[in-house]
Image (cartoon, helix red, strand yellow):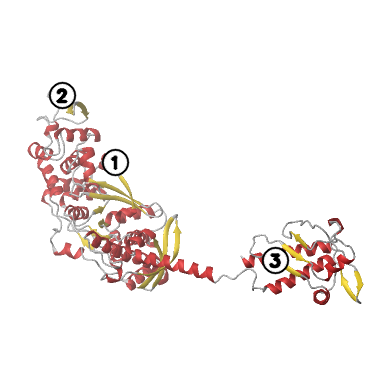
Amino acid sequence: MGVKNLWDVLEQCKKTLPLHHLHNKRVCIDLSCWIVQLQNVNKSHCPINNKLYLASLFHRLRALIALNCSLIFVTDGSIPAIKLCTYRRRLNLRPEAQDGANSHSQNLSSLKRNMGSEFSCMIKEAKLLGLALGIPCLDGIEEAEAQCALLNLESLCDGCFSSDSDTFLFGARTVYRDICLGEGGHVVCYEMDDIERQLGFGRNSLISLALLLGSDYTQGVRGLGLEAACQIVKSVGDNDILRKIASEGLSFTRKKKNSKKQGQVKCNDKETTLSCKVNMNGGIQNSQTDDQYLRVVEAYMSPKCHSADSDVVHRALVQRPFQHEQLQMLCSRFFEWPPEKTDEYILPKIAERDLRRFAYLRSTSSQLDVNIPMKEVPVKCPISAIIKRRKVHGRECFEVLWEELYGIKSSVVPSDLVESACPEKIKEFDDKRALEKKNQRKSRPKKSGKQCSLTEIDQKLQHLLLDIELGSESSPMASREVISDQMPTATEVNFMNRDPPIILDSYCRATMLCQETDITAPKHEVIDLLSPSPQVQSRVVSRCTQMNDQHITIIDLSESETERSPEHVRKARELRLFLASIRDDFN
């Protein structure tokens, strides 16, 4: 379709751009090319009745809608008279029918298409799906790619989706040949600026290549190769090539006079052999006359299209509303989808499109030095609040809560989009998170559960000490009686120190008794109970002495550590844990 082997010539200028390149752009779509492309991909997997090609079209459209890409469907009109020969050849008509059409094509008018054919019905279904999504459709007079090229040439759109290489011959400046969705999605793009700069081919040169190589409108020069044709066109130049063809036809490719069967064409200081016959005048023999070449040039330079200022074009440029219920009905009819599945596919994309429109509005006003606060923007921000941060395929995103929009509550959108549309929402979200963390730190309970007074701590400490030294298996209540009635002991603990030593003041009756019985014992004793195996300078030995008819417990710190019982070791461990908890409470 288009010019033979032209895509090979333009391969050097091919660019693969990320799908994001299309955001906020207006693009025309040659609908017939897309349907043929999708049908060829899916026909080997399932029959046409399964509408897989239409489902693939739906997913393409929703991906572009999410980028706020304004789309315009353009369909073919009548078949141009100059294309009838090629059209019938594609339909495998009899050779005589082709010859008759070829010899009288100049006297024929354009041919209306069969609107009842299977392909025409596929186009109708695609148009219905597009209208439900808010995509207008422009029905061309003849060639759809010619209408797309005119809109692009008149700057009414930013590019054209078409696989026909002759779109450039009709005047297009940017052509997207293919699109790929999913992770790493991209478009294959060709721009006329690159073709002119890198290859030296303008629009006139490309039309000349169509005459030499063949296209939908001409069979070309038989036996002329791709490289030779490019050299011929370059040798003449883009400004003069069409004028030369208009005055001489293709006679400028004449052979040397001394060659009768095979001649040489001199281009760029090189000679290229042409395997074609030479007529009596020295020109290349071809089934087409010079007048037919001029008609081909005229068909490319002035195709039958709706003019840029026509009402039909103006209506096609107006945005259409999204028809939610109509889309649900069509998806149920074409794909047997329930409404919930249709909404799951399309509503997040519609919401993302609206957010991109809001971001585009704010960026445009900012470029004009009009910085309006978000609350004062005439259009309400689609985002109600940010729920949380997410990461999708390695990309930073936000899960956002939407305003009332076709019933959708939340979805995930790229973080850079939210940053450009409403940075105030991000700041509000971050401030809220910081406040929640601060409140959590304040309300966090202490490890000890409840605070204890110094008196209670002193009593518990004395209970544990006496249990350890006495090796008693009695209940805590019995220990309390011994302490309170027989031997009051004051304990001094410095709890503000990181590793507080415990100072035991044995100034009570135990001290007096030790002095009377010549038992040497220090008045103050320091025990490091926080070490794994605390060194005890002296040990308390229990014995009962009768003094003034009272039983008094005497503490002697003279025995070695090896004489401790297992119960003694266990009590010492409990004491160390208890002291550690006290330190945590005061810290």
Q: Nearer the viewer, residue 86 or 294?
A: 294
Which mark, residue 444?
none
Which mark, residue 11?
1
Mark 1 nearby-residue class (10 Å; few <14, some 14–19, many ≥20): few
Mark 2 nearby-residue class (10 Å; few <14, some 14–19, many ≥20): few
| Count of numbered circles on the image | 3
Mark 3 or mark 1: which is in front? 3
Asked if the residue at tag 2 contacts the one at tag 3, i.e. Cβ–Cβ closer than 8 Å, the answer is: no
Instruction: Write down the quadrant of residue 579 in the picture.
Output: bottom right
Tell me the element at label 3.
strand
- N-terminal-most mark, 3 or 1: 1
Give the Cα distance between marks 2 and 1.
35 Å
Q: Nearer the viewer, residue 448 or 545?
A: 545
Instruction: Write down the quadrant of residue 291 in the picture.
Output: top left
Residue for point 84% across, 68% down: 512
Q: Nearer the viewer, residue 389 or 372?
A: 372
Q: How far across and down, in percent of the image, does residue 136 sit?
A: 24, 64
The residue tagged 2 is 259
- N-terminal-most mark, 3 or 2: 2
**What amino acid type is highlighted by mark number 1?**
Glu
Give the Cα distance between marks 3 and 1.
87 Å
- Above or below, 191 against 319 in this view is above
Furthest residue to the front?
516
Which mark, residue 493?
3
Residue for point 41% across, 60% down: 397
